[in-house]
Amino acid sequence: MPHIRPRLIFPLAIGGMALLLALSIQAEPRLLHSEPSPFGQVLVFEDNGERCLNFNSMTDLGRQTCMDLQEPDELVFSYTRMMISALFVNPAPRRILIVGLGGATLQKALAALLPDATIDTVEIDPAVARVAEDYFDYRPGPRQRLFVEDGRAYIENARRTGQQYDMVMLDAFDVDYVPEHLMTVEFLEHVKAILAKDGIVVANTFTNSDLYERESATYAHVFGPFFNLRQGNRVIVAARDTLPGMDAIRSNAKAWKNKLEPLSVDVEQETDRYAQRQEKGSADLLRDPKPQ
């Protein structure tokens, strides 16, 4: 998922003189891998102590994934910290589905936090799947299963075959934004149908999207009230049944505090985000195109 990382500029004092020079500490990004795919050129590069994945350009600050090379378990981007805080809503998911792989940040974090859980990931781009294994330490296996196919097709088939998940995370992006067929009422109804009792959906979107109000209305139409977490990106947390109250959120957050803080999650800050709920929306709903 794209996320903006600012370059760091530091003042430098030379020879005791109060001379401030605006010097970037960053050299040019170093390309490690480039591979064409049907969805854009997949690039892996190192920049400012981080290994990053992006499409088409190394200089675009809207990056898909970055991993701190010194602290590889750290959740570098705010949106991943918001998404992992969904454990405050459903603290013990046993079956998790993630649509979108990127550099496998969420997959690896959840596997470490939930050693008994099964994490299924659907990634449409085989080049991204290869890069996640070769450069970001992603290791598919019995508990970490990878399916290279379209996320909607997978979810529709999961509904037909009666599969159920405790948590569905939607983190699928092309070069520009969420693919249209993963945003509609019809798609979200399929997602809701594969949620188990107390199951939740966690969706990563943008705060500055032109579709913001329509996304809100669409999620509210399918799920009712949802938590609306915002910091740069917007993360929607909705439930198949009823959202928990703030007392339950705080209790679950307290229970997770010691395990999440080493990942650079500010538990108090993330908890406070759940005070904001979106009850409904009045904009036009996002729907599948009508058959011709």
Image (cartoon, grey):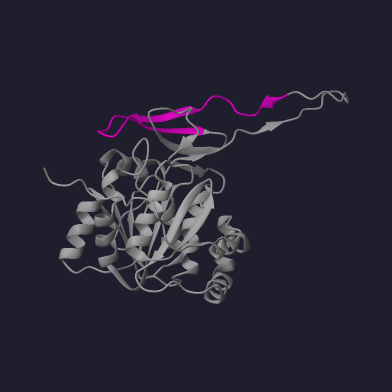
Question: Considering only vertical position in the picture, is 150 above or below 158?
Answer: above
Residue 248 covered by magenta stretch: no
How many numbered discs sit on the rendered protein?
0
Residue 119 quadrant = bottom left
Residue 262 at what x, y percent from top left?
Answer: 58, 59
Image location (x, y in percent) of residue 292: 11, 42
Please state which of residues 53 and 283 is positioned toward the viewer in this rendering.
283
Q: Is residue 42 magenta?
A: yes
Residue at 52 percent of width and 76 percent of height: 248
Image x and y of residue 105, in percent: 44, 51
Furthest residue in direction front, as rendered = 282
What residue is at 88 percent from the left and 26 percent from the top?
A: 16
Residue 75 seen: no
- x 36%, y 58%: residue: 219
Rendered view: 280 above or below 182:
below
Q: Locate residue 123 relative to residue 265 in the image: left or right.
A: left
Along the horizontal axis of the image, is 54 left or right of 156? Answer: right
Can residue 240 be seen in the rendering of this structure? yes
> Which quadrant holds the N terminus?
top left
Magenta region, residue range = 22-46
Is 288 placed left or right of 232 in the picture?
left
